[in-house]
Image (cartoon, rainbow, N blue to C red):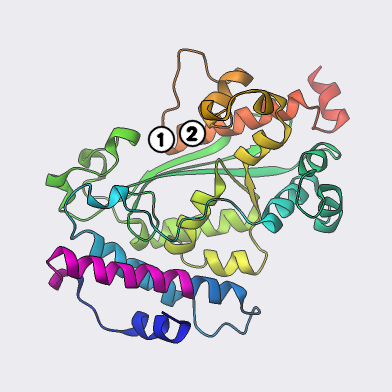
Amino acid sequence: MNLAQALEHADSFSLPGLLMDRASLDDERRKNEEAIGLLTAAWKEAPRGEEPFSFDVVRQLADRNRRLCDGYEPGYLRELPGNNLARRLPDADLVHGVAKLQHRRDKAVATSAGPTLDDLGIAYVEAPVSGTVVGFDIETTSKDPDRGYIINMGIALMDLTPDALPHDGHVAYFGIPEQYATQGVPLTEIHQITWADLAGKTPFREDHAAQKALLAAFKTFPLVAHNAAFEDSWLMLHLDGYAEARKAGKIAIVDSRDVCRRIDPDVRMLPRESSPASLENWARRRGTLKADEKERHLGLDDVFLMLRTMQAEFNERNMFPKSAQRAQA
């Protein structure tokens, strides 16, 4: 499939409910997901203001694919790899996130980090962090943003000081199609969310008030998430205006997992298979989660845990302004 074919496919008329057999579903889903990837890449690469199509085209095709995936039997898609979940943030976003925390220019951070970001950990600790960040976490019905739904989110603000607490926390649940009342909510064994939590709730894609509020928050404060590429991938295809604001440089993203990997020396000494940069393990090492406690895998709980753990790491590395550290002492 080339770009012209991807656009033609996105503009084609499709009724997912009429595709009943597995072969037809698979064929249409593969076309949808390939087109989403091609269109997203082309839109991102085009100079700002010269995009050959609106990003609404991509979001609408993702909506269509999501409805198509509702036609599969439960669990079938879980082991099938998708195309449109990013594994990591681009280097430029990692640099920009550090620059926003330190109120420096991206170029200064990039110079310290080096062309392959081998020394980004040095850049993290060579200037103090300050300001306010917005922590964000979602729970979903799939790992792939063009196949599943956002069903839970947590969001909170925190000032970057040695002893601040997260504040203005908010949690919300969002609806999914009625068929899951009997099928069960996908991935419930991870997030423990059941139909009783979602019954009667407005789907995220239709909750325009929530979308407007989220976009405003993300454009005001640096967005912090653990494994931020996951949230970023989902927001691209679910939050109206997010992709456009990202491309315009109005949204800065900080990956707290990258923070852990870059500046926590324990990560380099622990075996990779032990997942030392997972939020749960990082939090235990920093004392924000007790040894006998587990990560909740619910939006607001994970946001609070992430923000407090990142703060503990910043305290450990003396990354707050000296005046703030003296005040804490």
Residue at 68%, 43% in the rendered image:
132
Residue 79 magenta-drawn? no
Q: Amino acid at mark 1?
A: Leu
Does 304 sit left or right of 265 as displayed? Answer: left
Residue at 30%, 66% in the rendered image:
65
Q: Secondary structure at mark 2?
A: helix
Does residue 25 sit above or below 185 in this rendering? below
Q: Amino acid at mark 2?
A: Asp
Residue at 45%, 27% in the rendered image:
295
Residue 110, quarter of the rendered image: bottom right
Q: Magenta span covers which residues?
A: 17-38
Q: Which residue is mark 2?
A: 302
Choose between 138 and 123: the one closer to the eye.
123
Choose between 217 and 93: the one closer to the eye.
93
Q: Position of residue 77 (x, y in %)?
A: 27, 52
Q: Position of residue 241 (x, y in %)?
A: 51, 68
Instruction: Name the dominant secondary structure of the magenta segment.
Output: helix
Indicate the quadrant containing the N terminus: top left, top right, bottom left or bottom right.
bottom left
Does 257 sit left or right of 172 as displayed? Answer: right
CB within 8 Å, label 2 to label 1:
yes
Residue at 25%, 53% in the rendered image:
176
Residue 127, quarter of the rendered image: top right
Q: Which residue is mark 1?
A: 298
Q: Position of residue 296 (x, y in %)?
A: 41, 28
